[in-house]
Amino acid sequence: MSVPALEVRQVAYSDPLVVPMLTELSQEYWTRYRHTLGDLTEEMRSREFAPPGGGLLLLLAGGEPIAGGAFRQYDEATAELKRIWTHSAHRRRGLARRVIAELEREITDRGYRRIYLTTGPRQPEAKGLYLAAGYTPLYDPTLPPEQIGKHPFEKELHLS
């Protein structure tokens, strides 16, 4: 199935368009880990993804968010990817990969030289996504996922 023409939009974490992303992520975390993002109204007040150190973008189809992701400053040279999401009705279409590519472009434009991220042991799809996108695992991939806990990854960026 082809990916439709989409609008890429940078938005504030407090933008109402972010609600579907946070709601579904919170439900996903509950299903897999028995915890949520907590109070979403409070979560949306967070400034951790605000410029100049961070950002959030959404892919919109017909004005509706169908995928997105955020980043924040991890250290002076490193951005951390967070909240990578694809709406459950739109998965397996390459949208998460597009989100990552768009975020990487923005992160590079902001002058970061490295990206760091973690994903959980019960998210094999995310692990596969990051490996396919060129991220290097910072853990022993031969160990059982639950023994590792959070799965950290990194990717060095090449500034143009």
Image (tube, rainbow, N blue to C red):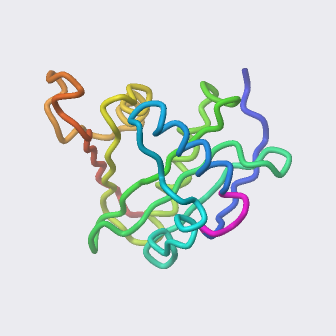
> In the shown orientation, is residue 102 left or right of residue 123?
right
Q: Position of residue 143 (x, y in %)?
A: 14, 23
In the foreground, 131 or 18: 18
Q: How many marks?
A: 0
Instruction: Determine the image quadrant of residue 95.
Output: top right
Position in image of residue 82 (x %, y %): 44, 53
Which residue is located at x 41 percent, y 66 percent? 72
Q: Which residues are magenta?
A: 13-18
x and y percentages locating residue 25 in the rendered image: 54, 44
Query: In front here: 104 or 47?
Result: 47
Look at 16% across and 37% down and name the residue there: 139
The answer to if 14 sits in the magenta stretch is yes
Q: Residue at x 45, y 63 (%)?
A: 107
**Quarter-of-image position of residue 149:** top left
State which quarter of the image contains the C terminus. Answer: bottom left
Q: With respect to residue 10, does 143 lie above or below? A: above
Residue at screen point 42% across, 43% down: 35
| Foreground of the two, 102 or 21 | 21
Pinpoint residue 133: horizontal percent, then vertical percent: 41, 37
Residue positioned most to the right = 62
* The N terminus lies in quadrant: top right
In the image: residue 47, left or right of residue 141: right
Against 46, residue 9 (above or below) is above
Front-most of 30 and 66? 30
